[in-house]
Image (cartoon, helix red, strand yellow):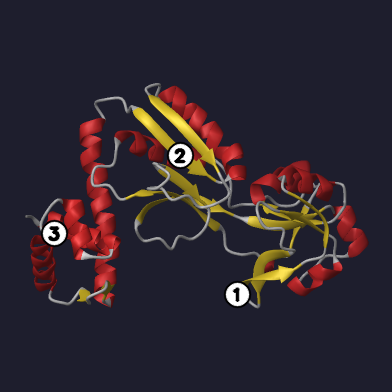
Amino acid sequence: MDRTDAMALFVAAIDAGSLSGAARKGGVSLSTVSRQVTALEERVGTRLLVRTTRALALTEAGRNYYERAKQLLVDIDELETSLTTDAAAPSGHLTVSGPTLFGRVFILPILSDFAMRYPDITLDVLLLDRPVNLVEEGVDLAIRIYDLDDSSLMVRRLGNLRWVVSAAPDYLAARGTPNSPEELLDHDCLLFYDESRTPAWPILIDGKPGRTDIHVRASSNTLDGVVALALAGAGLVYAPAWSVAHHVAEGRLKVVMRDCELPPRPINAVFTHNRLLSGKVRALLDCLVEEISNYELDTIPAFGSRTSA
């Protein structure tokens, strides 16, 4: 068994939570996995795992090795798959998941072009505002817009998504411009929600991510609805930068509280670890990386820049 195979068994053991789980996944004996992990530790010269009767625990060195090894295995898989699948057109069934709003505006148009480019691939698209279990729900690839804490998934960064607070100039002239989270309770706020109607907005509070209470004048589960209300001067709206950018450029909305903005949210494509990443998934990943880079999701134009140009 070569070094790459030993590395793969080590990663599989962590993902499965046990050496026996890695043995089942790799189709080898438990003693083989144990022997390979021990040899791996001897080769690198440090303890990687703390083995107990109930679970495996990573040492600090083990955590570093696991994260680097996992990415190396993905790189190797993509390289080997590219050599064997480039000559043939990707085909088969592909199930894709993503959040509802981002999916309608961005993912579906990309998938339409993808379907035309690869006529031998059939698509099943699930737009859901909840995390999906890729294995249990049979999802090949999911788009997630938040930091990930599931180390068993492979991740491909697609971009960043910024959210901003904005309002019509007439509203700001009449009610003043808020400069701190506390001032939002004195303003009319327009709440866009997907699942929770909690009257609060994510924002930086004293330089740290938090949530601030707001006075809700109107709420809607449609982004277009609250943006339209903001354009009419009904209040402040917290929305993705892409949904208000053209209104800002044309002077109809003005972004406020820039010092309180949270860092952009990562847009990630996630998929399960597979030593032989299928050509259809790799093709979709490449398509998503290429197409999403064409959208300005992390920037906001200067106020009135289009009218003054």
Q: In this view, does 249 lie above or below 16?
A: above
Q: Regarding mark 1 in the picture, which secondary structure is present there? A: strand
The quadrant where residue 208 appears: bottom right
Residue lying at 26% horizontally and 49% vertically, measured from the top left: 75
In the picture, the quarter occupied by the N terminus is: bottom left
Residue under the point 87% across and 47% down: 232
The residue shown at (49%, 27%) is 113
Is residue 273 rendered to the left or right of residue 270? left
Give the residue number, with chain letter if any, for mark 3: 6
Q: Gap in Å between the C-alphas at discs 1 and 3? A: 42 Å
Q: Quadrant of the C terminus?
A: top right
Secondary structure type for disc 3: helix
From the viewer's side, name the closer residue of 289 and 226: 226
What is the CA distance from the residue labelled 2 to the residue labelled 3? 32 Å
Q: Earlier in the sequence, mark 2 or mark 3?
A: 3
Mark 1 or mark 3: name the one nearer the start of the chain. 3
Disc assigned to residue 208: 1
Residue 148 locus on image (x, y percent): 45, 60
Disc 2 residue type (three-letter): Val
